[in-house]
Image: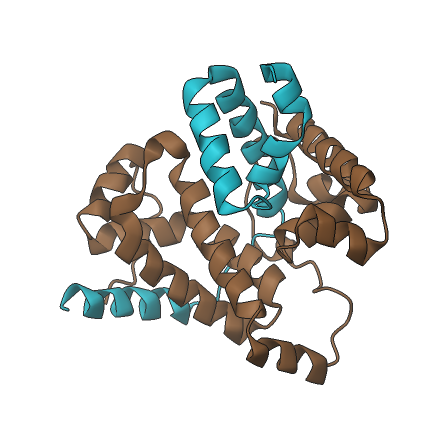
Chain colours: A brown, B cyan
Amino acid sequence: MLTRSTSNVPINEDQLVILLKSKDRKGFALLYDRYSAALYGVILKIVKFEELAEDVMQDSFVKIWKKIDTYDPQKGTLFTWVLNISRNTAIDKIRTPEYRRRITDTPLEDGLQHTGSNVQIAIDHIGINQVLESLAPEYQEVIDIIYFKGYTHQEASEHLGIPLGTIKTRVRIALRELRKLTKN
Amino acid sequence: MNIQEYIASGILESYVLGATDPEENRIVEKMIKKNTILRKEVEKNRKALHTYLWSYAQRPPQALRGNILDQLDTLDKE
């Protein structure tokens, strides 16, 4: 079993994709070291329970392994692709009857506590908490309900009791604000 | 619809947030393949979303890494 961290090996994304496409274990270890914290954070935010998040991570990596031949770099970065697989796997999980039953049986505080500070990851030049502090709650709310709950704009509008036009405007403003933070 | 109107429609933001259906995805992907401005717009929105998502990053339990890599090994032998 490979336990040594490989994150210090300098390898660019094209090289990583070649390793992954040849089903090289080192490639998957590298992929894991590079992106598991981001993927796990997103998955946990969606499914809310740690042991389910672990299952979803595992299922996602199996899918990545099986589907890596279909990855097309022209459509987006590797991270975007693995993120979509992970998010979709997590959303599928929360739509199962077992999950719905579980969530009604378990008292949960509204949303999961933000635990991002557990991990030290630099996002370009800004701090982690600065991102959340910079984005007003009403903008986080629409991004969260669409991205982490998988709602359509229409469903978000009905669920939040906000006109569809306002949802669209908030989505646009949210991304515009985040784009300002992303500039480097 | 011209490019600016297409951008203003908000479809690219929906696409990036995964709120579009497969048919809409197909259309957006066809459009961005043909047009550099649209492609750049999508890339900027994706980066913006990633900035947000990384703020929720959390290291998974330590055992998970080995479990996943071991499972991939068993697939390899299938």
Residue ranking furthest to the bottom = A105
Instruction: Please provide percent x and percent y for residue A61.
Output: 36, 59
Q: Nearer the viewer, residue A35 or A65?
A: A65
Image quarter where the C terminus of chain A lies is: top right
> Going by the image, does A55 lie left or right of A11?
right
In the image, is residue A93 above or below residue A35? below
Q: Quadrant of residue B64?
A: bottom left
Q: Nearer the viewer, residue B65 or B72?
A: B72
Instruction: Please provide percent x and percent y for residue A114.
Output: 69, 58
Residue at 58% in and 68% down: A94
Instruction: Please provide percent x and percent y for residue A65.
Output: 28, 56
Q: Nearer the viewer, residue A125 or A138?
A: A138
Residue at 29% in and 63% down: A3
> Going by the image, does B11 lie left or right of A176?
left
Determine if residue B58 is in view.
no
In the image, is residue A73 above or below residue B64? above
